[in-house]
């Protein structure tokens, strides 16, 4: 299969490479403004996950298979270890990547992790998403609708149901890389209690809250979100380094 991805190169890298993973149903475009800021300091790879955006996939992939494809994409590009920045459903993909291929992940950033428990159900996610929509920028909502239609309702619903069965709080338990949870102060999908639960479950974790921001942090508050990420990485002692970039490859499986 073919994976579409943006590769953003900074004029001079002062931090290690970054992999960004978008949310359910949407595409890499949903992370565009935040990616542009992070790419000022770090080589940044932003793929469309298989079956979404411009990345093809005939069948509906499981989250574990998508995480394995992300690992293969990093290997094909000669990147790693990387800072993984996942948004919403991308947090699920990122934590599975960190658990199964810890040598590829130096730190994990969860932006707006969803499926807060209780209830953590697919229906609960839909209700919270509907509550969030009026809080988001119209450009993000319009782009999300286009991406959802492109992916197809069947793929979105099946992925939603599978993600709801993955206990994110259990998956971060014992996680080797340091973890940052970033939430918007107005985000109905990531309430403060859920962010604190994730922090308490992980051995090396902290929480940052962006006041007045909603769920779509990549569009809603990219500068503040990037600042929180950079402060976290600075405190964790990530050395400045330039990633080795292999020959371009757009295939993963």
Image (cartoon, rainbow, N blue to C red):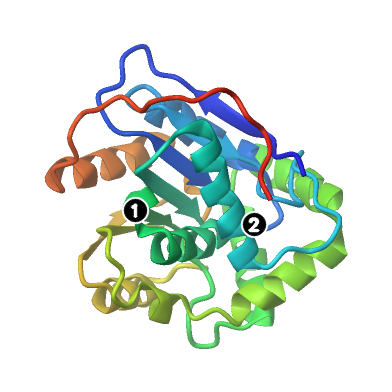
The image position of residue 192, as x and y in percent, is 35, 71
- Residue 142: image tag: none
Left or right, residue 173 beside residue 213: left
Element type at marker 2? Answer: helix
Residue at 76% from the left image edge and 38% from the top image edge: 54
Gap between marks 1 and 2, in whole Å? 37 Å
For residue 211, say whether it is visible: no
The image position of residue 63, as x and y in percent, is 62, 66
Q: Which of marks 1 and 2 is nearer the N terminus?
A: 1
**Above or below: residue 6 compared with residue 109:** above
- Residue 133: image tag: 2
Few, some or many residues within 10 Å of mark 2 (<14, 14–19, 20+): some
Residue at 59% from the left image edge and 61% from the top image edge: 132
Residue at 43% from the left image edge and 36% from the top image edge: 79
Outermost residue on the bottom side: it is 118
What residue sits right under mark 1 in the picture? 103
């Amino acid at each position: 299969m073919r994976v579409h991805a943006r590769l953003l190169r900074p004029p001079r890298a002062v931090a290690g490479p970054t992999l960004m993973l978008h949310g359910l149903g949407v595409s890499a475009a949903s992370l565009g403004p935040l990616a542009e800021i992070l790419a000022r300091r770090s080589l940044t790879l932003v793929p469309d996950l298989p079956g979404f955006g411009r990345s093809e996939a005939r069948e509906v992939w499981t989250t574990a298979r998508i995480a394995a494809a992300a690992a293969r994409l990093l290997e094909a590009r000669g990147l790693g270890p990387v800072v993984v920045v996942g948004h919403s459903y991308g947090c699920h993909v990122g934590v599975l990547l960190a658990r199964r291929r810890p040598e590829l992940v130096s730190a994990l950033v969860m932006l707006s992790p969803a499926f807060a428990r209780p209830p953590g159900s697919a229906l609960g996610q839909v209700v919270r998403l509907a509550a969030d929509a009026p809080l988001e920028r119209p450009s993000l909502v319009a782009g999300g609708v286009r991406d959802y239609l492109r992916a197809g309702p069947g793929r979105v619903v099946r992925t939603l149901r599978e993600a709801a069965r993955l206990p994110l709080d259990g998956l971060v338990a014992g996680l080797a890389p340091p973890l940052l949870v970033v939430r918007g102060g107005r985000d109905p999908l990531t309430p403060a209690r859920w962010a604190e639960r994730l922090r308490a479950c992980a051995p090396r974790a902290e929480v940052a809250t962006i006041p007045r921001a909603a769920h779509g942090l990549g569009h809603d508050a990219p500068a503040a979100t990037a600042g929180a990420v950079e402060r976290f990485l600075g405190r964790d002692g990530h050395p400045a380094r330039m990633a080795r970039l292999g020959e371009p490859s757009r295939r993963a499986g």
